[in-house]
Image (tube, rainbow, N blue to C red):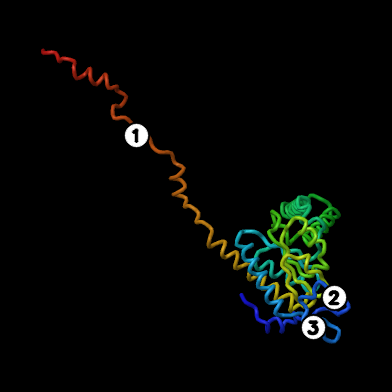
Amino acid sequence: MRITIQQLLMAGTHFGHLTRRWNPKMRQYIFMSKQGIHIIDLKKTQGCLEEACAEIVKTAASGKAILFVGTKKQAKDVIRSEAQRCNSPYVSERWLGGTLTNFATIRRSVKTLESYERKASDGTYDLISKKERLKMEKERAKLEKVLGGIRDMKRLPGAVFIVDIKKEDIAVAEARKLDIPVFAIVDTNTNPELVDFPVPANDDSFKSVGLITRMFTDAILEGQKIALETQPPKPSASTSETAKKPPRKRRSRSHGRSNSSRKDDKTKPTSNK
């Protein structure tokens, strides 16, 4: 799963922001500045990406879900497609405040969405007016847009992967509050100390975001494969039935007759006719 410097270079991951917009805490990841633009050190990017992917493999192998977050124009389509490829939850439209810290309320909203879908399929729409039907459809579409990617997320994720932590600052704050590990692409205008596993790279390029997100997805798929291989085999139906069946009691051969009655029969004299 090793990525080369050439791949990173071709994707334009080395282009940072204007030098006047930089965050001094990104100094260790900057190689140089050219024509007023910071150039990211791709060797640091390569090392950070490999370290982050190795940790993602462990997280996925333990059976935990990784939440993908990226709502900016350059990231939303990649986030959606890559999350669906590894069957992971994602947020690609808008981060709802409290998605992690107020998870119970989010689950209630998901149940509301499911109730609207049931009404659309069980004939309820035929019994209500057109105005009420349009209102329900509008509300259902709104909920589907913001909750569609996390509707199957029954519990809090084991980690969060974020594109552009400056735009998704609320998601970062919620994950940090709940001690959920944060993996993120950090550009030269962000603070990498807010992230557990930062990957310094250009977060404004579709190619750059796509390359790094695909690497994370491949790592998740590898972890999921390990989880399946290490999972203990399920017992067969016949074996489980045998285990549940109580042991059969052995019946006595006397057929209800006691030992004393058998002895009496042997000692009783026979009559001579």
Residue at point 79% right, 61% down?
146
Residue corresponding to mark 2: 22
- 254 above or below 204? above
Between disc 3 and disc 1, the foreground one is: 3
Give whichever of discs 2 and 3 has the lower sequence position: 2
| Secondary-structure class at tag 2 | loop
Measured Cα–Cα span from mark 2 to mark 1: 84 Å
Foreground of the two, 159 or 242 = 159
* Res. 33 mark: none
User: Which image quarter: residue 250?
Assistant: top left
- 162 above or below 267? below
User: Is residue 116 something one can see in this rendering?
Assistant: no
* Res. 32 mark: 3
| Secondary-structure class at tag 1 | loop
Residue corresponding to mark 1: 250
Badge 3 density bin: few <14, some 14–19, many ≥20, Cα 10 Å: few
